[in-house]
Image (cartoon, rainbow, N blue to C red):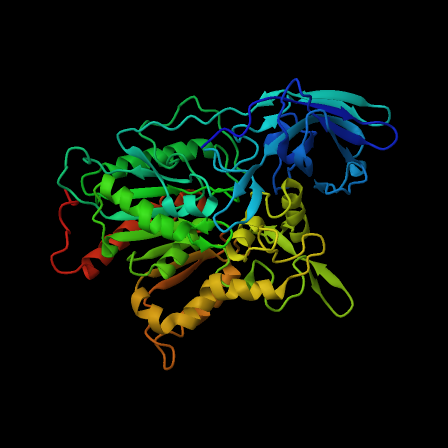
Amino acid sequence: MRRVLVGLVAVLVSVSAGAQTVAVRFPAAVSGKALDGRLMVLLSNDPSEEPRMQINDTMASQQVFGVTVDGMKPGQTVVVADEGGDGISGYPRATLKDVPPGDYTVQAVLNVYETFHRGDGSVVKLSADRGEGKQWSVAPGNLYSKPVKVHVGPGTKLEISMDQVMPEIKPEADTKFIRHIRIQSALLTKFWGRPVFLSAVVMVPWGFDEHPEARYPLIVAQDHFVSEFDDFRTEPPDANLKPVYSDRFHLAGYNRIMQEEAYKNYQEWIAPKTPRMLIVKLQHANPFYDDSYAVNSANVGPYGDAIETELIPAIEKQFRGIGKGWARFLYGGSTGGWESLAVQMFYPDHYNGAFVACPDPVDFHAYMTRDLYKDDNMFYAQGANKRVEQPAMRNYLGQTLISMRDNIAYEAALGDHGRSGDQFDIWQAVYSPQGKDGYPLPIFDKTTGVIDHKTAEYWREHYDLDAILQKDWGTLGPKLQGKLHIYVGSDDTYFLNNAVYLMQDFLDKTGTPGYGVPYEGEVKYGPRAEHCWNGDPAKPNAYSRMHYNQMYVPQIVERMEKTAPAGADLSSWRY
């Protein structure tokens, strides 16, 4: 992938007694090229790390004010004014004038956009993944300033030079158990109008190099972009590791727990009775998100077909996979959960089972807390005489962590036209048709929250997994019998259990008069479990999330033994 930018940018920041502004420019002496991208000014009152590492959708988030620049020329000044406007979006505070006077660390980042001339003739500007997994805060070639402490208040002025360029990402090296593969996708290259690559991280079994005659079952572990298996460690835990408290799991020293569990996984992986398999994590980051959702999409491209017809065959060829549907399986949680279910449904003969944990909404009647088909607004529920703001996240006690309105404001500050690189924007990019401007057609207005029901109908037809199951069960049902295993916590952080309830309502009807064959799978709920419960009734989520293999492999082996055709290889991988 070509380097987007080489050069430096100068930024002038002035905060004064009148209108507070951030004026940004880069001189010709630094770069003679015009630049496109999302310019973000960051303010933080937390000195623990750089502001660019502190922008998120949690209670601890620091402040970001973003504006899109198109063809910003050398010497041209872009002003972020305290009143907002001119395409400026802020989070958690809407404008600079809302920032309380005080001491802050200031930093500026330019998330550089590339112009794509796509195969369908549309032209869009997006930030391509550059090997980092679509993370603007560390993306190679993005520009940023060194953090500077400043007092924001009357009469304060400050000049900051954004003289840093984010470095290239060093590829991970192969090890005895962890290997890598990278191919150019013909399908995606045609769609995006430039070379596009697909990659994967492959965990090979013990004895892989010593048993060249063996052919292996394949498990696709659907996940976000990862460069390694963080739940696999060949060395004992670091005795000198300073313990870190996990806010998510309410556990002290969780970093050490992760190392301990990862080392146990290694020990089990090499144990004599462990079935020998290939575990694969795909890398399919794209200009909209850290992964593609593994399906074909009008905006993201034919990732489903590219993965199934290009990447998976290449993996099985290089790493001696059996290469048959009866010997392939899927598992994953959250985004990976939705992907596992969708891929099993859209390519039902390619896989022999999907273990689906805490999936993203599988029925858009329960798009988190909102019904895209019946509700009129994403931000609030309208009553007779009042409206109630809707949550986007909660903890296991039901306490709201962020409202839907604020969650959308967070993404709006990071990018317009669906270019934030975050959750709601990737759902929109994958599920929506392409708009006249070449960008995804919005499912709702980010300022007002008004839902576009016409676009929602497109979502229903193409990506509402429950609706598709119900519509096509007559043909899908016989291909999916015994393959669907769905798990979610009853107190999922993102309300994802709501959609699973609706899907279970349908699945429980299968096998009764008028509802085709029985699905012969399972749907289970973890009482009081937050995101992302994956079906283990014995271990808390903090532990079970690191033991997908131990949970699902026994069921996978049983399924293969039950369904493999006559003469199938059930032995070469059992050494």
Q: Is residue 165 above or below residue 262?
A: above
Residue 183 occupies quadrant: top left
Assign the C terminus to one quadrant of the image. Answer: top left
Residue 441: x and y, percent? 59, 56
Residue 168: x and y, percent? 48, 25
- Residue 359 vs residue 433, the one in the foreground: 433
In this view, the residue farthest toward the front is: 121
Q: Is residue 14 above or below residue 552?
A: above
- Residue 183 vs residue 465, the one in the foreground: 183
Residue 275 can be seen, yes or no? yes
Judge left or right: residue 55 versus residue 325.
right
In this view, the residue farthest toward the bottom is: 513
Residue 453: x and y, percent? 61, 66
Q: Is residue 29 above or below residue 550?
A: above
Which residue sits at x=76%, y=30%? 22
Which residue sits at x=11%, y=57%? 567
Residue 481 occupies quadrant: bottom left
In this view, the residue farthest toward the right is: 18
Which residue sits at x=30%, y=33%? 179
Which residue sits at x=71%, y=26%? 25
Residue 271: x and y, percent? 22, 38
- Residue 84 vs residue 71, the one in the foreground: 71
- Residue 476 vs residue 112, the one in the foreground: 112
